[in-house]
Every structure is written in structure tokens, then in C-alpha cells.
Amino acid sequence: MNKPEPIKPEDQPIGLYAKREPVFNRRIDGKFRRLKWAIMVICLGIYWITPWIRWDRGPYAPNQAVLVDLAHRRFYMFSIEIWPQEFYFVAGLLIMAGIGLFLVTSAVGRAWCGYSCPQTVWTDLFQHVDRLFDGDRNARMRLYKAPWGPAKIARRLAKWSVYLAISFATGGAWIFYFADAPTLQHAFWTGTAPAVAYATTFVLTMTTFVLGGFMREQVCIYMCPWPRIQTAMLDEKSLLVTYKDWRGEPRGSVKKAEKNPGQFGDCIDCNQCVAVCPTGIDIREGPTIGCITCALCIDACDRVMKETGRPRGLIDYATLEDSEREKAGQPPTRHLKLIWRPRTILYFVVWASIGLGLLFMLGTRVHTDLTVAKDRNPPYILLSDGSVRNAYTLRLRNMEGRPRQMEIAIEDLPGAKMWTEDMAMEQATRALTRMVPADETQSVRVYVVAPANTASQEFEFKLQAVGDAREKDETEVQFDAPEGQ
């Protein structure tokens, strides 16, 4: 019987799970690192400061600049107030955000992932906490491999406490977007806040603590769907962080290159590009799903090239198409020209068109709205004098931050009059006025009576804000009458 051949390493099946290997990235300074610092500070500043910004909307509306008021179903953003029926504004902003991601990805790859994604921002912040407590790359590696003892436990507990404090500040800040921040903060610390506030803070605190403190690059590589979606949006004209292998290979140290002139490329195989990578990949193996395009490897490589007297750009932003040009000895194309191409211009035009459309709708919208519901049972009542009465429930909506007097009038129903429950039928008229409180919807029960022999037909209720000809709304409704009249 023949003995089975041993399975070769390259033929081993690939497992569905791989144990996480911690990434100890080295500190680096450079223009892209400074850009990450700036964007991180801006993003965190916006997130933590925004709920505390005040905005005067008058005595009848909240004075928080950005507020999602779920209790009253309102969304406030500075001078803009969005009502539930105006959700298309929010939908438009979400569509703009999606197209904006398409635009950024087609132009500069995963720049969103590398600089502005919340996972990236908080992971970057936690990695700086690591350096503060454990030192830079080599010190953290030694501490990781060291046996557990009093010193290591104390350092870990101190670091994880800072993790938890940052995570708590993250989860706690989120709830302030849904209620008046100073009031909710006082209620939170005195134990009188709603239970949902404590539950939300706990969930967001723990997710930030786990995802930013311990899972980090696993979220980007395994959990996030965006890296897989964006691969369909990249082409040979997209700017990516690229290792120029035709210039760097074969690799060799500085000493080898000095002993054998012309036999080695510019890459001295120092592994600095790997050491600074927050996801621990080797960009020299080509762009992979783990590359978030943060460009820290460019900073590291440029510094090494400068120290060894070689031209920068061994690792750089480049398109696959332009890489072939450089490989053939042609000068590289300016990045601005690479970005502005038909595909990105089309994305930008669509994105800008939606934005301009939303601004136009925002500038031309009225703050008065009328909805009418007709009683269906009975559809009409025949009065003793032969006249016909229909009943309606009107909802008068005042979407301004001040009370307004509004007039309700009947259009296109000859001889018809109306009255409300707090009026006598003898006081019926063609028009009524009501004072509608600020930022509220007032329900009015209205009876409409038409002369005998009036046929079933459609007519309009017209709502007009007194003193403002532009603020009006009309709703067409059915008036029912007996057949044959």
C-alpha cells in the first residue's frame, strides 16, 4: 500500500478564523501624520462641543444649536428646523453623504477610512494613550511579552482606566444630542435622567472601549463592509498609497548597495513602513483590504529616503495608470489632474446638484401646513331644512418659533359655511381665525353646511397666516351629499 504524500504548507486549507496578532505601530512625524492629528482634533472637537453650543430661537423653541427632539418630533440645526413630514431633507443629506463617500473613494481611495472614520479616529486616540503609558513600539512589544506581575498589572489598569474614561465621554456625549445638554447633564449625575440615557451611555461606552481599545484593525478588516464595497469603485485612475516596486526592488541594505552599485533598488528593507502602519500590513506587497490609506508609511519612507540621500516618493500616492507611466520613464502627472477626471466630476456634479436642490427647497419652503381628515361615518347629515352637513378634522401646523394667527377659509363650494364645536351653528361663516401656538399643531373640529340640492363635489380648505401672503396652504377634500340632489 502506497504511503500518502504529506500535505505541503501551501496546500493547507485556509481557516475562517485567525487569532489576532496585536499591532504595535511606531510613532512617526510627517505631513500626513500632522494631517491626521488635525482631522482627529477637529472631529473630536465637533463631536464633543456641538451639543453645548447655544442658538437663540426665541422664547418658544429650544436654544440648543443641534438637537434631535424625539419627544416633539423635531430636528434642529442652528437656524434650520426639520419636521417629520420634511424628512426628505434628512434623506437628501444622507444621499449626499453616500455620494460624497463615492467621490472621495474614486478620487483618493480609502481616505475616509484613513482620516475621518470614527473607528480610525478613536483607535488613533487610543494608540496615543498606549504610547503615553507603555512607550513606543519596542517598549510596548517587550511589555506585551513580559509575564504578568504587579508593575504590568498596574500599568494595564491605569491605561484601561483612561480607555474607559474616553469611552464614557464618547457614550455620554451622544445622549446630549437628544435633550438639552446642561439639563440632561445635571439629571444624569443626580440619577434622575431617563433610563434610556443610562442604557445608551453604557452601550456606547462599552462598544467604544472594546472596538477602539482591543479590536482596532479587526474592525476595519473583518467587520466593516465598506472596504469590500469600495473595491468595486476603484479603477486604474484612483489615487492609492502605492509602493513603486520597479524603483525599490531588489531590496538591499545601504551597505550592500554601496558594495554592489547598481544591483539594488532604493528600498533598504528597513521595515519602517510596516512598523508605522496602524493595521500592521506591508504596503510593499501591494494594496490590500487592510490598507486604510492613512499614508503614514509615506511619511516613514520619505524620512528614510532623506536620511539615505535618495529621492522621496518610493511609497507615494499614485494611480496604477500613472505608475506605469513612471515605470516607463515618463514624468508623473500632477495629483490635481488625476483627481479631476470624468468619473469624479460626475460624482461632484450629482453631489452638488442635490445640495443646491436642498438649499432651494429650504429657502422656498413655507412654515404653514394644513391636513384635513373627513368623517367617513356618517359621510353626511341631512338637516331639517334640507341643507347638508359634513364634518372634518383640520390640523393647523405652525412651524415657526412664534404664535401666529391663521385664517381658515372655504373655497369653491357655493353657499357653504362652517363653524366649530365651540360655536353655534348660527355663527357659521366662510372663514374662521385661530391662534396657533409656536412650533405646534392645533387640531380643529369643523362642520361644513351647504344649501339644499348641493351635489357631491370637491372643494378646498385654505389656510393663510394673517399678515403674510406667502405663508399659506391649500387642501382639496370631498363634500358628500345625497344622490340626486
Image (cartoon, rainbow, N blue to C red):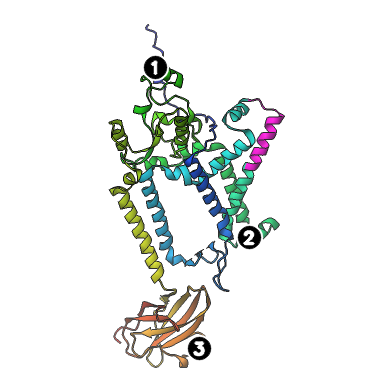
Q: Amino acid at mark 3?
A: Met
Please state if 316 lies on the left or on the right of 44 as rendered: left
Identity of the residue drawn at 66% across and 25% down: 147
Residue depicted at x 50% and y 33%: 276
Give the x, y percent position of residue 121.
Answer: 52, 44
Element carrying mark 3: loop
Give the residue furthest to the front. 309
Magenta stretch: give its range. Answer: 146-162
Between discs 2 and 3, the one toward the N terminus: 2
Dominant secondary structure of the residues highlighted in magenta in the image? helix
User: Residue at position x 57%, y 44% from top?
Assistant: 208
Q: Is residue 153 magenta?
A: yes
Reading the image, the residue beneath label 1 is: 260
Residue 325 visible in the picture: yes
State the SS at label 2.
Answer: helix
The local crowd at label 3, few if under 14, some if 14 to 19, many if 20 or more residues have their Cα within 10 Å, is few
Cα distance in 3D space between marks 2 and 3? 44 Å
Mark 1 secondary-structure assignment:
loop
Three-letter code for the amino acid on which mark 1 is drawn: Asn
Which residue has dot 2 on it?
A: 184
Residue 17 in view, yes or no: no
Q: Is residue 37 above or below residue 196?
A: above
Read off the residue under disc 3.
Answer: 423
Does residue 150 appear to the left or right of 50 in the view shown? right
